[in-house]
Amino acid sequence: MSPKQCCSEAMRRRQRQAGLSIVEMMVGMVVGLVASLVIMQSFSSSETYRRNLSGTGDALQSAAIAAQRLDMLIQEAGSGLARGGQWVWGCRLLVTQSGNAVLPSPSGYPSPFSSVPQTLRAVPAAIVNGGSGSDVIIMMAGDSAAGNQGKGFSSATGDSLVVQSPTIGMGLKSSAPASNFDLILAVPHLPTDPGDCRVVQASNTMVAPTVVNDASLGLKVVTFNKLIPLNTATYGAVDASIYSGKKGVAYHLGLRDSPNFAMLGVNSDSELVQYDLLKRIDPQIIGENIFLIKARYGLDNGVGGDINDNAVDEWVAPSESGWTFADLMDGKRATQQRIGYIKALRIAMVVRSSQPITTPAPLTSIELFQDLGSTRRFSRTLSTEEQRYQYQTYEWVIPLRSMRTPPNI
């Protein structure tokens, strides 16, 4: 064989051995496809786990923020007013600002408070039953250094108050701007059903109490002026029905921005909203991813325990006779005593993940207050769309610390 033929034969052999056969290529593609499927499945599982974990974290964070805010607001319910509950609770609230009516509200409240009536009466805390949806919680509290003590007053024309005891706790921050000066709730003492009560504002011309040295006693004493002029241009004057021919009592609420007269509810975007009943600020969002809030009254009414021993005797739903919102707003003297039985609120809050999750066993219903009697529990069946989310339920008790004082009825 010639060298030329030898080289040609070797080249042909190398050409036959180079590259991959169709079978080898098919096998390689199958192996690669299987590997890709394994990788994608692993990534999908990892992403699902991450989303579930992230959803749980968001829910926990939302719950913590919302619960803290609820605690801060509800614990102080009744502050500054509880000692005068036999006169204050149930009185019809009147508030104006610069000649415009605030309470009773001239129009219906926006969602999620549209079920709340426009006329409200003073209560430390109240629950508007939301049926299968969230309840609305209403709380009212002052923020005064006067220690819940009302000040008896008289008035000639309603544009000023003449108090019968020192104005301790009032005007101590007299350097505040006139628009932010002290608010006062003027209430009549009536032997019958509660009447009207009005929020007014002290004028910045009020002489604040001062501490001076009394050389004759060798002690420091407080001097005070019994006259409290009112800022009638902003909050108006006291109605004659409150002071004329009867004894009135003034309850100091603190500087204008201090008292909390608020409503709390969950809107259609799963946000917990705080609404200022005195309309000093716009509604505030204080929590997110809140799916549901329900509440129960904790009563010290002697049912199963001792009455007025500052211990909860029973938990009552806001749908029960005598404890509906309409019942608490009936303006009857007997209702004042029932309001004084409220010592705590039991809150159930359901938070929801911000995104749908994948789970082999979705939650089909929400069950709350399961340790109570059947008529005081709450149950809601979740729709198919709602079952796509993850839920966390939290229940806790918030004591109304200012309501520990037994009512003087």
Image (cartoon, grey):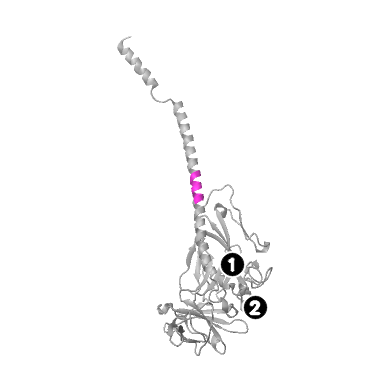
Asked whether residue 211 is drawn in magenta, I would say no
**What is the secondary structure assignment of the residue under circle 2?**
helix
Tag 2 and tag 1, C-beta contact below 8 Å:
no
Q: Please tell me whether residue 2 is drawn above or below residue 20 in the rendered image.
A: above
Circle nearer the viewer, 2 or 1:
1
Estimate the x, y position of residue 287 in percent, counting from the top left: 49, 62
Snapshot quadrant of residue 115? bottom right
Check residue 345 in the rendering and tell me which mark sits there, or answer none. 1
Q: Which residues make up the magenta segment?
A: 45-53
Estimate the x, y position of residue 113 in percent, counting from the top left: 54, 68
Q: Which residue is mark 2?
A: 334
Residue 159 showing in the rendered view: no
Hey, what amino acid is under mark 1? Leu
Q: Main secondary structure of the magenta part?
A: helix
Q: Nearer the viewer, residue 350 or 206?
A: 206
Residue 89 relative to residue 279: left or right: right
Q: Nearer the viewer, residue 254 or 217?
A: 217
Estimate the x, y position of residue 34 in percent, counting from the top left: 49, 35
Q: Please tell me whether residue 6 is drawn above or below residue 139 in the rendered image.
A: above
Q: Local crowd at mark 1 within 10 Å, few (<14), some, or many (≥20)?
A: many
**What is the secondary structure assignment of the residue under circle 1?**
strand
